[in-house]
């Protein structure tokens, strides 16, 4: 990761060709890291923070490039051509220089924003909700819709639920647990509905028989995790007492640490597949009705990742403000009242060219 960071810093000021290669390489590295980090304790947050930092630096460099090039152009205009001697050739030369700068900046910006969007899509795997009613009504609705409570020692900060449809789908459960917790956890299954069944620890790596069962391969309501904010005493108070089915999780130290990085003020829905988050969010809102309100449709589940992603979004907004300021500056400099010794046709030609450049600048800003 450090080598990649140094390499990105080295090529940051290079040409458009290098910028394209940089984006492609970062996307390849990100795909590799996504597949690797689940096997490294704390790897997801470490990798996400690093790549958000790289994307932030890419956008910041584009803003610096624009400011530097425009400042140099304006300075050269003032040194070579005084304002009272503005001619057609001066204006057209300035337009060509501006066009070249904005084409380069636009290509770099689109590549940087594209990579930032990829990070956002992969990292914003959760949706946040607030409660409109008392906890008893909310928990009763979860029980009526077949949700199962995951009991994890040393995690009184949260209540955790999974859909009942994946109750006997160890592979689906494993994916959810591994997404936010470490690999190798064990589960204890307590089913009130199956009181004659013997309770015991089930190693997730050794229950492939149930996974292959046709009745448990595709849960109808999706694969997601619900995390509800607790107050330290919520699991024993009557208001937060769960009377439905439970699954006991025996977490490792890494699991406990990871859960501590999940911050939520109300209810957090975490999808196993980012592409399915919208469907899971709509399903959850449908079964809950007016019991919950959507606070955030997309957000990371890990507070450490959320902070880095927020910085990336802030830098993207800063770049848009930079582009806006430069457009205003270009508009101020594109004054044709000082054109001298031009007939009306040449004057209109210069005006159209200046307008074309401004349109390109505004298009870049909107993009």
Image: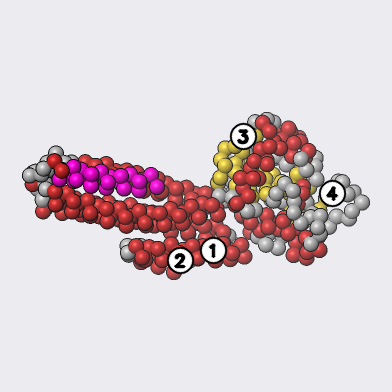
Q: Decide: is 186 above or below 277.
A: below
Residue wearing tag 1:
31
In contact (CB < 8 Å): disc 3 and disc 2 = no
Q: Main secondary structure of the magenta part?
A: helix
Residue wearing tag 4:
191
Could you tell whether 65 is left or right of 293 in the image?
left
Q: Residues within 10 Å of mark 1 (few under 14, many from 20)?
A: few
Could you tell whether 295 is left or right of 320 in the image?
right
The image's mark for residue 25 is: 2
Q: Residue at x 70, y 63 (%)?
A: 184
Which span is picked out in magenta?
346-367
Foreground label between 1 and 3? 1
Foreground label between 3 and 2? 2
Q: Secondary structure at mark 2?
A: helix
Q: Which mark is first along the chain, 4 or 3?
A: 4
Real-space CA distance between mark 1 and mark 4, rounded to the nearest whole angstrom: 39 Å
Q: Residue at x 20, y 54 (%)?
A: 72
Residue 151 in view of the camera: no
Foreground label between 3 and 4? 3
């Amino acid at each position: 990761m450090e080598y990649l960071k140094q390499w990105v810093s080295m090529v940051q000021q290079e040409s458009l060709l290098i910028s394209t290669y940089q984006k492609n390489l970062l996307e390849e590295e990100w795909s590799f890291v996504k597949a690797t980090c689940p096997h490294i304790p704390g790897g997801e947050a470490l990798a996400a923070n690093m790549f958000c930092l790289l994307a932030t630096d890419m956008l910041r460099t584009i803003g610096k490039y624009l400011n530097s090039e425009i400042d140099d152009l304006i300075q050269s205009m003032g040194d070579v051509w005084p304002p009272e001697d503005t001619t057609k050739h001066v204006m057209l030369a300035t337009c060509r220089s501006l066009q070249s700068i904005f084409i380069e900046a636009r290509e770099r910006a689109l590549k940087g924003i594209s990579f930032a969007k990829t990070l956002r899509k992969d990292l914003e795997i959760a949706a946040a909700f607030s409660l409109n009613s008392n906890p008893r009504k909310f928990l009763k609705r979860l029980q009526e819709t077949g949700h199962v409570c995951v009991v994890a020692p040393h995690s009184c900060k949260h209540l955790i639920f999974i859909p009942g449809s994946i109750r006997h789908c160890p592979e689906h459960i494993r994916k959810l647990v591994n997404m936010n917790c470490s690999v190798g956890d064990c589960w204890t299954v307590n089913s009130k509905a199956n009181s004659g069944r013997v309770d015991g620890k089930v190693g997730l790596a050794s229950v492939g028989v149930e996974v292959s069962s046709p009745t448990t391969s595709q849960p109808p309501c999706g694969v997601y995790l619900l995390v509800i904010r607790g107050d330290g005493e919520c699991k024993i108070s009557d208001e937060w007492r769960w009377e439905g089915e439970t699954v006991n999780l025996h977490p490792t130290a890494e699991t406990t640490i990871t859960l501590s990085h999940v911050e939520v003020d109300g209810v957090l829905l975490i999808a196993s597949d980012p592409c399915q988050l919208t469907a899971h969010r709509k399903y959850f809102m449908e079964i809950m009705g007016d019991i919950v309100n959507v606070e955030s449709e997309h957000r990371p589940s890990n507070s450490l990742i959320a902070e880095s992603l927020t910085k990336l979004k802030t830098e993207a907004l800063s770049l848009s403000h930079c582009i806006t300021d430069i457009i205003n500056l270009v508009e101020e400099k594109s004054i044709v009242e000082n054109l001298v010794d031009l007939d009306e046709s040449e004057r209109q030609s210069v005006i159209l060219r200046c307008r074309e450049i401004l349109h390109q600048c505004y298009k870049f800003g909107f993009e």
